[in-house]
Image (tube, rainbow, N blue to C red):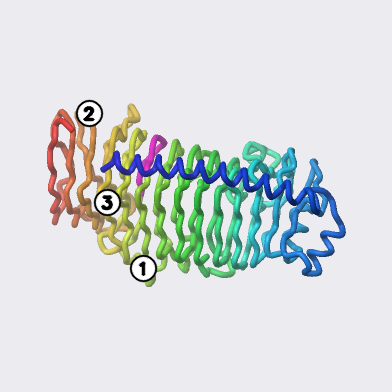
Amino acid sequence: MEANVQLFIVFKRQILLLLIFTCWMVGFARGAEQQETLGNFKNPDAVKDVMSGKLAEANAAWWGFDATDSTEAIQGAINSGARKVIVPYMGKEWIVRPIELASNQEVVFDPGVVVVAKEGEFKGEHDCLFAAVGKKNITLTGYGATLRMQKSDYMGYKYKKSEHRHVVSFRNCNDVKVLGFILKDSGGDGVFIGPTRQNPSPCMNVLIEDCTCDNNYRQGVSICCADNLRVENCIFKNTKGTAPQAGILFEPSNTKSVTTNCVVSNCRSENNASAGLRVQLSRHPAEKKVSILFVNCYVNGGGIGLQVGPIRDNGPKGLVEFRNCIVENTRFPGIYIYDKSVKGASVLFKNCNIRNAGKKWPLPQVPIHMASIKANLARHPGGVEFVNCYVYDDLNRPFLTTAETQGAEGFSQIKGDITVCNPYGIKKNLGSKSKNINLKIISRIRE
């Protein structure tokens, strides 16, 4: 099964490379055609035609490309009201200050375009490279394009500490697409999806596809409030700087923020300082059901593989599911569940494989660990199911352990089936207080 998942991911990558090459060819052809007509240079007459509605497509270069600061060019094109804005390849980087996006617009970045946050700018704690608040119907397309910030600057003494300087940020926005970019070196997240402090409404109908989030400060992608969200065929890697430092994290911002009908599929997490794929629901409203699915995802290296918690005793119902996922070569547990109440949303691992996980030394680690840390959050820990899951390990240790804090009951309602492939046989430690455990363990010495 895991070979099929990896083969499928490789196939998707090949299709993506072909698509990027095709976009390069189409982009250059369209750019050549445009050069013959209106050109990639300052053109006040073309700007007037866009502003009057005569032209529906705007070229940011018409507002005047400036190799030292092109903020006004890109912002002017976006503010023009054009249905489509082109950011053409100019042979040099587009250096900008924070850019505000507009509703009902597609912004296309030609292959080879690199948009860079201007050094010494972005001093505001919430300054983002591209941001939208309360907007709708926005598409950012950038196959072969890069959006890059100045992460090392924001970590220095000249900047007030912040974890909110994102590459792309959407708050209270509907019908959003982010397609094909490399998003890197932020002072926050590669992509942020969430509410504002004044308005807890979720972002609705969001698609993040074919993107690579690399070397971001807080998360590759943060989902803090969303309804009907898809993250497809993306890579999250090298996240490091400030907690949580995950590849992708679902974490409601407040007690009115929701995560419903959210799917992460065919994605890869590599070498993130903390978890690869993480769900944290301590602030999720209890009256709203959770619906989060990870399918055909792969985690390689980094800290923890798949992490869930907290889900409170009085927390939301619903389901968090990991289906057809593979975790390999993590320093800490491949699966880590903490403060997850049996009374809250269910957690399901189906057809998941854990290989060579939890090998950081000298700290004691195991492939799967469940912990009760704060009894005031989850006095009744448990409610986890494994279906056709495999653990591959070559160390003489338990494959599964639990730990209960003082004041918490033992783990309960742990069920399903796990096949353990370990030359030392099966070892587990569910604690002396565990109850209602219906977990079938199958031993395979060789696999």
Q: Could you say where residue 161 lies in the image, as x and y percent from the top left?
A: 62, 45
Q: Which amino acid does label 1 sit on?
A: Lys
Q: Which residue is drawn at 56% across and 41% down?
A: 21
Looking at the image, do the residues carrying marks 3 and 2 touch, with CB atoms under 8 Å apart? no
Crowd around label 1: few <14 · some 14–19 · many ≥20 (10 Å):
some
> Distance from label 2 to label 1 (Cα)?
39 Å
Q: Mark 2 points at which residue?
A: 394
Q: Distance between the residues labelled 1 and 3?
A: 19 Å
Q: Residues within 10 Å of mark 3 (few under 14, many from 20)?
A: many
> Viewer-proximal residue, 77 or 414?
77
Nearer to us of marks 1 and 3 is: 3
Q: Does the magenta stretch include residue 391?
A: no
Please name the amino acid that badge 2 sits on: Asp
Q: Residues within 10 Å of mark 2 (few under 14, many from 20)?
A: few
Seen in the image, is 424 located left or right of residue 27? left
Q: Can you say which quadrant of the picture contains the N terminus?
A: top left
Could you tell me which quadrant the C terminus lies in?
Answer: top left
What separation in Å lies between label 3 and label 2 (alpha carbons)?
Answer: 22 Å
* Residue located beneath label 3 in the image: 349
Q: What element carries label 1?
A: loop
Residue range in magenta is 298-307
Q: In this view, does 246 lie above or below 173?
A: above
In which quarter of the view is residue 214 placed?
top right
Residue 437 x/y as whole percent: 14, 53
> Which element carries disc 2, helix, strand or loop?
loop
Secondary element type, mark 3: strand
Q: Residue at x 84, y 63 (%)?
A: 48
Tell me, for residue 289, which label it has, or none.
1
| Residue 347 position within the rendered picture, expressed as x and y whole percent measured from the top left | 29, 56
Q: Do the residues labelled 2 and 1 touch (CB within 8 Å)?
A: no
